[in-house]
Amino acid sequence: MTLFEIVAILLSLSALFSYINARFIGLPTSIAVMAFSLVFSLILVGLNHLGIRDLADWAEQLVGEADLGRTLLDGMLSFLLFAGALHVNLDDLAEQKWLVALLASFGVVTTTFLVGGALWLVVDWLGLSLPFIYCLLFGAVVAPTDPVAVLAILKSVDAPASLSTKIAGESLFNDGVAVVVFLGILGIAQGEREATFASIGLLFLEEAVGGLVLGFILGFIGYRLLRKLDNYQVEILVTVALVAGGYALANRLHMSGPLAVVVAGLMLGNHGRKFAMSKKTEEQLDTFWELVDELLNAVLFLLIGLEILILSFELPTLWAGLVAIPVALLARLVAVGIPVMALKPFREFNPHSIRALTWGGLKGGISVALALSLPAGPERDLILPMAYVVVVFSILVQGLTIKHVLGTGDKAP
């Protein structure tokens, strides 16, 4: 199957599912595409059990060659993050900077250790074998709130502006931190990195701080280039090159590509929008990146739904995944509750903020992609389906009910 054929099939299925939803159902597009994809996959699994294997084999080949892990982490994520950051108001984000910073750092680490510790007890109780370090690795996999899922859902609900800023700001930054934590724990598990503060601190400096600095440089270069032009076609091309080239450069330099493109997107979406773009350029740029965002979102959620075709679900593993859902939610509650309570003496929060931030911390493609990036082995065979169960619940259940949870409002600044 050629690359063009893979892209053509994914786009065709995404368009078909999106059309059916828009015409007859009316759910948020991302959730609908994933739900249709999941049902489609389950039908193929059923046909496979009935002896009709050709279509299922073809679909498995498609999913295998599309390779969600590499496709997302090495390609789609850069464009999706930039498109999301481009529309975040920097002044609003600055007002929430301490909460966002705590959630994106303390929250990720806390979730990792709480989920890892609880999972270690769960897998032993279920008769499964997973070393403690790999339980922590699973914690790192489900720790990040996925910016793609979060931003896609927030666009479809009428969330208060302050709450949207908190959730979106956290999701844009915490995936970069989560990847650093994931890489650190994976290095320890494989004996490639020492379990010391110095080793992890150096990794954090290289990846996270390096990514932030590189993003600032990229944003400044993009701002200066756009300021010299008044040709929206070329300016859009500059932003595309900035995202693709900057993300690739960050990966080559072992810096956080996600953090780099988020910072660049924030700079161009705010200072660049005010001082370097004409009104026409601003309109065309927004239209282009909104289209890119919608298109890639549809394909990504389609792939998440199709991923079930290549997963192996045994009953103990399924039970472990189901138990991991409340464990992840409780860990999220603690990781959100502590920063909010710590900041309460200094600023006002709505009484329902903790509940809204907990339920709004959706998991998504990044968690699946991180699990897929694990080296082949029994640990990966257990972590991947468990992560998939948590992600499916998060997108379908939390995503479909978040509007009711946010309906209480978070109108405090």
Image (tube, helix red, strand yellow):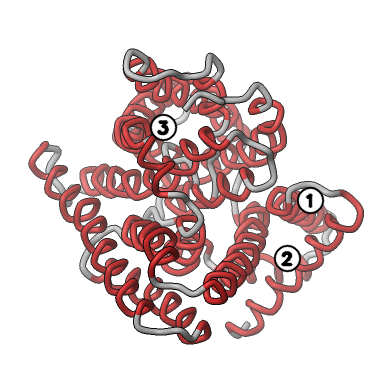
Question: Residue 77: x and y, percent?
Answer: 47, 61
Mark 2 neighbour class, 10 Å CA radius: few under 14, some 14 to 19, many 20 or more: many
1 or 2: mark nearer the eye: 2
Marks 1,2: beta carbons within 8 A: no
The amino acid sitting under disc 2 is: Ser
Q: Is residue 142 above or below residue 261?
A: above
Residue 39's disc number: 1
Q: CA distance from mark 1 to mark 2?
A: 14 Å
Residue drawn at (52%, 22%) of the image:
353
Residue drawn at (79%, 56%) of the image:
40
Disc on the earlier residue, 1 or 2 = 2
Marks 3,2: beta carbons within 8 A: no
Question: Residue 154: x and y, percent?
Answer: 61, 43
Please give left or right for residue 400 compared with residue 244 in the image: right
Please give left or right for residue 328 compared with residue 305 in the image: left
Location of the N terminus by quadrant is bottom right
